[in-house]
Every structure is written in C-alpha cells, then in structure tokens.
Image: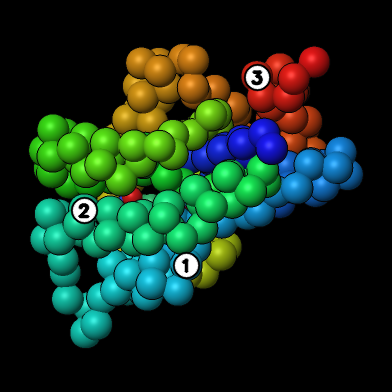
Amino acid sequence: MARGRFITIEGGEGCGKSTLLRGIAEKLKTAGIPAIMTREPGGTRLAEAARQLVLSPPDQQAWSPLGEALLMNAARSDHVDRLIEPTLQAGEWVLCDRFIDSTRVYQGLSGVSGALLQTLHDEITRHTQPDLTIVLDAPAEALISRRSSRGTSDVFESRPIEFHKQVRQAFLSIAEREPERCIVIDAQQPPSSLVSQALDVIHRKLVPA
Ligand code: TMP
C-alpha cells in the first residue's frame, strides 16, 4: 500500500489555517483520497494535555522558553508516534495545522538554540517529514483584527505586534531556504481561491499524474 502524504500548514495566528485545512480535506474526500485533520500542539490525548499546559499555564505562570520548547516537542513526539506515522503507514493523508516550523519560529524567536531545536526535530521526526508545507502569509497588522474577532488569546497571541512581524519574517525565510518543501500563499485572498491555489500545488507536487 502506498504511504499517505503529509501536509503541514503554517503561519501567524488568525491567518486562516483551519479554514484552509477543512477546505483541502473536503476536496480530497471528494477526490476519494482519505485524509485526517490534526493540529499541533495537540492531536492526541497526551499532546492536547500538553497544549493546555503550554498555551494556558495554571495561575498565568510563565514557562521558560526552554520549558516551552520541551513541551512542544514532548507533544509532537506522542503525536508523531501515535497518530501521524501510523496514519501515513495506513495509506491515509495527514493534514496538520502547524508542525516543526512553528517550533523553529516561535521557540527560536524566544531564544532557544537552533542547534538544540534541530536535534530534537531530527530525533522525533526521523521517519516523518512533511511532504509539503503551506505557509499562509499576511501582514501582522491584518491578522490582529481577525484575532480580536475570535475573542480568545493565548500566551503567544497576546504578544506585541513587533513579535508577530518577526514571526512572519521567520516563516518567510524558512520557505525561502526550503523551496522544495515549502510554498507561500497569500492569506488575504478569499477562502475559496485560497483553497484552489493550495489544491493546484498539491496536485502538482503530490498527486501522481
Ligand atoms: P494555534 O491555535 O494558532 O495553532 O496556536 C498555537 C500556538 O502555539 C501559536 O501561538 C503558536 C504556538 N506554537 C509554538 O509556539 N510552537 C510550536 O511548536 C507550535 C506547534 C505552536
């Protein structure tokens, strides 16, 4: 049986990742391609518990950047072992809202050493690398209003605009460094054209002719 394909979607908070994910999943289903949707941090019971701990710490205490990085990676290790890898091996596609690039960007910007993050990534994702990463891009200012209409805010969302501008640049530079894996899509277009642009890329890169 052919191994499933692994697609990750990355970008700043409020850029429309989950809408795009749902749109892609629907179209794949119509095309007869089985796919699951999942997210990071999260996706399994343990990883969802870690998500709660890291994004909404008790008594509003703050994790150290290293503590955050370790929790993100602990969650990922369970997610990869229990859900992502078995699903790919069963021939299904995995659509994941955030993955290793988010750790590179957010924990990297918080000051965790790139070498340490790389070591953790190599260990956890040795056999499980994304086939395609879609980076949804929009100016930080445009994402603020989308987030405020959602009404919720976690430890990362509530950081100042300068941080979110750096997040955007960091995702763009990963995409520039890894053009084979990454594609940047303008997040400010209507959801339907966003989905069709993503599907064009998926067909070109992942679906055998
Ligand atoms: P989301 O609901 O937009 O995906 O939010 C998850 C938050 O977690 C987001 O602010 C980015 C942050 N995050 C990291 O800092 N490191 C990571 O490795 C991941 C997956 C997410």
Dot 3: element = helix
Numbered label attached to residue 205: 3
Whether residues under marks 1 and 3 lie with C-beta atoms below 8 angstroms apart, the answer is no
Q: What is the distance, in whole Å, between disc 1 and disc 3 at their CAs?
A: 28 Å
Residue at 41% across / 55% down in the picture?
81
Numbered label attached to residue 30: none
Q: Quadrant of residue 4?
A: top right
Q: Image quadrant for the C terminus?
A: top right
Structural crowding at the residue carrying mark 1, measured as other residues with C-alpha within 10 Å and reported as few (<14), some (14–19) or many (≥20)? many
Q: Which residue is mark 1?
A: 44
Q: Position of residue 15 (x, y in %)?
A: 55, 45
Mark 2 residue CB less than 8 A from any atom of ligand 1: yes
Give the residue type at disc 2: Ala
Q: Which residue is mark 2?
A: 69
Q: How many marks?
A: 3
**Vertically, is 198 above or below 51?**
above
Q: Position of residue 154 (x, y in %)?
A: 36, 66
Q: Quadrant of residue 207?
A: top right
Residue 117 located left or right of residue 51: left
**Vertically, is 90 above or below 157?**
above
